[in-house]
């Protein structure tokens, strides 16, 4: 017996009503949550159609072989930024007028592996051995509405398809549990002279990976208490009966990180000659959601951890992309340069306690955020439903080379000539998709500071 997928009824309605717009197929993403017993699908979204250079191309020639994996995987990358802790891209779907055949199954298999591989590259965390590694592929015939649901083990490149059950349920996430957490971060990432050949983005990610270990090893208080990992999260909580509308039960989470290493670890200070540094300092709002079917404390804590790591990493990536898109020049004879950082915005899913998120720069309007949601998730939202979770943060950027040791020695003289740093990102302007694009930036010692106003 394969895995069981419990699916929100509105997802089935969405898939059934998708318009192929004359094409032979439409593909998209399935979003939800894994658990040891079964998986939950609460949202589906089609991959936005790609604008063809030749508008005269006729849809009948649109073959399955023409499915753009790069376009689909970058859509998944964008969508993954909009998911709070606990939610994942669980798999992919294809809706078509054609009969199911080996070509469809092979395409779905390639796509689900490509999507997972692409998203995994950006994560600061890894899946545990205990976690479910199956991802789902769904085929639906647009005329008969027949579906074929199968799963693949993403940890095994040679895995074969396994059948899975696809069952609809009304009001699936109307009473999911939310966990909220405010995290104060102060991350210093020295950029050593030996790493100047790396992009600033790569250097930053390497530094964040070290900070991520602190978050992973932290102590998490739920409503002020340390709870045993294997305990039921709802233990001691009063259960509400007869819930017919979205009612959320929220938990407050506090994070305690170690300041010192354990006694069995020895630490020695080191001095590095640095070309600059990246400093992230400020406060971030984090949220995670978990199903209400006997959830474990360890699953709730894990969802919060991953939201902390994701939101910090995503903001860094969005900032780098924005700098490249706007081609912001380096200010000469200036050591410090300020940029507005994106803050987090939450949006509710109708009929659910779960909220999705996005990131908004100070000069972006609510209408732009609304349009981005429509484009990425194919769901309409109301601008008045946008919940801005944080005050606007700013980033401090040092564009001069910094030769100071990393132990706060600021008196060393700096070289006059900046070192050339190449920042490589991939961008598609219309929906922020990533396509090969490189920009050489004449700024070696670049230092970003996150702090709250």
Image: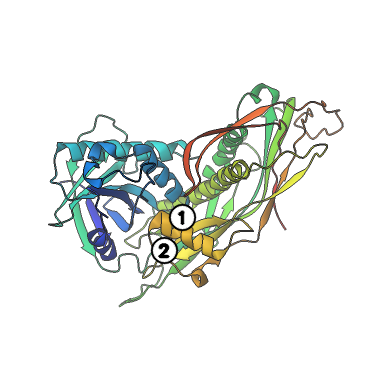
Report which quarter residue 235 is drawn in: bottom left
Q: Residue 172, percent across and down?
A: 30, 65
Q: What is the secondary structure assignment of the residue under circle 1?
A: loop
Residue 327 located left or right of residue 101: right
Instruction: Check the picture and name the quadrant holding the C terminus.
Output: bottom right
Report which quarter residue 390 is drawn in: bottom right
Residue toward you, 299 or 133 = 133
Residue toward you, 439 or 140 = 439
Q: Residues within 10 Å of mark 2 (few under 14, many from 20)?
A: many
Earlier in the chain: of badge 2 and badge 1, it is 1
Q: Residue 249, percent across and down?
A: 43, 69
| Numbered circles on residues, count | 2
Residue at the far top: name it. 194
Residue toward you, 229 or 386 = 386
User: Which residue is rendered at x = 34% and y = 41% of the image?
Assistant: 130
User: Which residue is rendered at x = 63% and y = 43% of the image?
Assistant: 323
Residue 337 located left or right of residue 386: right
Residue at the far front: name it. 56
Pointer 2 and pointer 1: residues touching (CB < 8 Å)? yes
Residue 397 vertical placement versus 296 (above, below): above
Residue 28 vertical placement versus 408 (above, below): below
Instruction: Tell me the tag on residue 354.
Output: 2
Residue toward you, 428 or 215 = 428
User: Which residue is rendered at x = 65% and y = 61% of the image?
Assistant: 391
Instruction: Tell me the tag on residue 84.
Output: 1
């Amino acid at each position: 017996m394969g895995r069981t997928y419990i699916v929100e009824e509105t997802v089935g309605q969405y898939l059934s009503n998708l318009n192929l717009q004359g094409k032979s197929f439409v593909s998209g993403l399935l979003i939800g949550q894994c658990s040891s017993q079964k998986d939950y699908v609460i949202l589906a979204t089609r991959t936005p159609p790609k604008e063809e250079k030749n508008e005269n191309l006729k849809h009948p020639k649109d073959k399955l072989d023409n499915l753009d994996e790069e376009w689909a995987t970058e859509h998944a990358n964008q969508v993954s930024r909009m998911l709070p802790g606990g939610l994942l891209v669980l798999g992919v779907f294809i809706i078509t007028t054609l009969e199911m055949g080996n070509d469809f199954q092979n395409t779905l298999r390639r796509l689900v592996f490509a999507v997972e591989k692409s998203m995994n590259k950006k994560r600061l965390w890894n899946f545990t051995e205990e976690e479910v590694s199956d991802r789902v592929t769904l085929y639906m015939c647009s005329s008969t509405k027949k579906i074929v649901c199968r799963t693949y083990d993403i940890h095994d490149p040679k895995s074969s398809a396994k059948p899975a059950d696809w069952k609809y349920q009304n009001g699936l996430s109307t009473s999911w549990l939310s966990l909220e957490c405010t995290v104060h971060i102060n991350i210093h990432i020295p950029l050593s002279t030996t790493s100047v050949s790396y992009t600033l983005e790569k250097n930053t990610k390497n530094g964040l990976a070290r900070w991520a270990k602190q978050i992973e090893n932290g102590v998490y208080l739920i409503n002020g208490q340390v709870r045993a990992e294997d305990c039921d999260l709802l233990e001691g909580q009063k259960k509400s009966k007869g819930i017919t509308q979205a009612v959320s039960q929220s938990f407050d989470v506090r994070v305690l990180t170690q300041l010192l290493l354990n006694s069995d670890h020895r630490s020695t200070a080191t001095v590095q000659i640095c070309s600059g540094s990246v400093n992230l300092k400020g406060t971030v709002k984090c949220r995670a959601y978990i199903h209400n079917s006997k959830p474990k404390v360890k699953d709730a804590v894990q969802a919060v951890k991953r939201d902390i790591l994701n939101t910090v990493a995503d903001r860094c990536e969005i900032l780098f992309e924005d700098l490249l898109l706007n081609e912001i020049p380096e200010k000469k004879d200036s050591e410090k340069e300020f940029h507005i950082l994106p803050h987090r915005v939450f949006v509710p899913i109708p009929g659910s306690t779960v909220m999705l998120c996005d990131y908004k720069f100070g000069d972006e309007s609510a209408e732009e955020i609304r349009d981005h949601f429509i484009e990425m998730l194919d769901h309409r939202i109301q601008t008045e439903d946008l919940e801005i979770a944080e005050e606007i943060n700013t980033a401090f950027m040092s564009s001069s080379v910094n030769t100071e040791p990393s132990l706060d020695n600021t008196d060393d003289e700096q070289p006059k000539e900046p070192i050339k740093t190449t920042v490589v990102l991939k961008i598609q302007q219309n929906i922020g998709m990533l396509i090969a694009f490189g920009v050489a930036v004449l700024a070696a010692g670049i230092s970003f500071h996150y702090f709250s106003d």
